[in-house]
Amino acid sequence: MRLWLARLAATAGSQMLMVAIGWHLYELTGSAWDLGLVGLLQFAPAVPLALVAGHVIDRRHRARIVAVCMAVLVATTLVLMLASLQGWAGRGLLLGLSIVIGSVRAFQMPAQQALTPLLVPPALLPRALAFGSAGMQGAIIAGPALGGFLYVAGAAVVYGACAALFLAAGLLSLAIRYTHRPASAEPVSWATLLAGVQFVSSNPVVLGAISLDLFAVLLGGATALLPMFAKDVLQVGPWGLGLLRGAPAVGALLMSAALTRWPVRRRTGTTLLASVAAFGLFTLVFGASTSFALSMFALAASGAADMVSVVIRQTLVQLETPDAMRGRVSAVNSVFIGASNQLGEFESGATAALLGPVGSVLLGGAGTLLVAVAWWRLFPALARRDELVRTPRGAPSA
């Protein structure tokens, strides 16, 4: 529960921060390219730091690593708050601190992923991940909406609220207790650093699950363009942007609650690929919509489809990976997630500069549908996976 509450606070703070930075930057520059550049700069540190982060996470107390990450985010948001109050918050500062935020995520995300299996038994992991996702989606709903409304009072107010949430998350992370068993004191080498990469590349189910997220969300993400849709297409203000950013989480929250009660047990591969295809389909609906209500529905439906994919993929990756490797494998997974989210935002911004926001989203949705079809053929072991949690031989089936 301490981990759950810490992630709740951190997720709400992160969502509020992204709303504030996105709207703040768009007010300063009015550039779709700059909106995409925020995503690129947040992703840039992930690749060079991934190997180091995974190595550290497998050897140090994972909850304390999360706490340190929260402390850095507190400092970052306080700088943004002061800069906004004193009038020296410019394009360079917002983009520069985006690099800091990306560096923090390179450690925070894999540490949280590798921490969860230490706190629940394997048989309960799918439900635990769904329950955790329900809380996170609730924060994703409240965070952007609250951030959008607070922004009316000024960017500094949002940044100050973010700092308070990150502080709470850090203190809760310090209170997490588990038996820390450090990995063997193996000397640091390229072999130990690259062990996570080698494990992923040699396991078709893990590789297929991780890469599916990369390409599907990379093409289908429209988050970076929501300020353009809110202002130029749907003609709503910051409050509308907050609601649009929170809409996918509404669907995801409802779906995660359903998955907590009725977890996926069979036909795992088919369900996973079908959920990715549905995500692409609803992205197309959002891109073609000029109605605020229809756009909200399409985003909510895409969030529900994505949640099915997230729970299945996270469960497969965690259960197929031994604990001594979870930090390094989670670091590799985080690079793929970062590429799909932050690099996807850059891709959306770059294509929007050429095709406009509507053309960019429609192209991405069509690409996601093609990815779902392609992965059925490229990763047959994943597509044909039946049980999500394998039943040990001789044990009764759930």
Image (tube, rainbow, N blue to C red):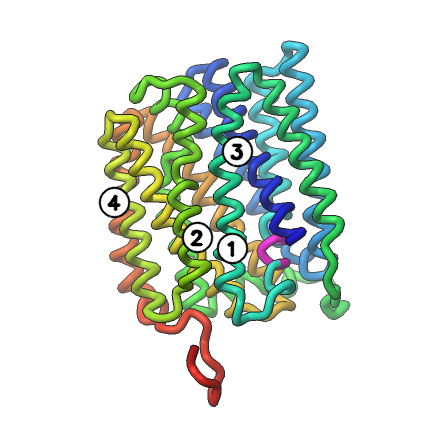
**Badge 1 density bin: few <14, some 14–19, many ≥20, Cα 10 Å:** many
Q: Main secondary structure of the magenta part?
A: helix
Question: Would you say residue 49 is visible in this rendering?
Answer: no
Closer to the eye: label 4 or 2: 2
The image position of residue 351, as x and y in percent, is 33, 31
Amino acid under disc 4 = Leu
- Disc 2 marks a residue whose amino acid type is Ser
In reply to whether residue 114 is colored magenta, the answer given is yes
Q: Quadrant of residue 71?
A: top right
Crowd class of label 3 (few under 14; some 14 to 19; many from 20; radius 10 Å): many
Q: Nearer the viewer, mark 4 or mark 3?
A: 3
In this orientation, does residue 348 appear? yes
Who comes first in sequence, dot 2 or dot 1? 1
Residue at 35% in and 40% down: 300
Say if mark 4 contacts mark 3, CB within 8 Å.
no
Q: Is residue 180 magenta?
A: no
Residue positioned 43% across, 35% down in the render: 246
Secondary structure of the residue carrying numbered label 3 = helix
- The circle on residue 281 is 4
Please give the residue where the numbered disc 3 appears in the rendered image: 143
Q: Which residues are magenta?
A: 111-115
Q: Which mark is residue 256?
A: 2
**Label whose residue precedes the other's in the sequence (4 or 3):** 3
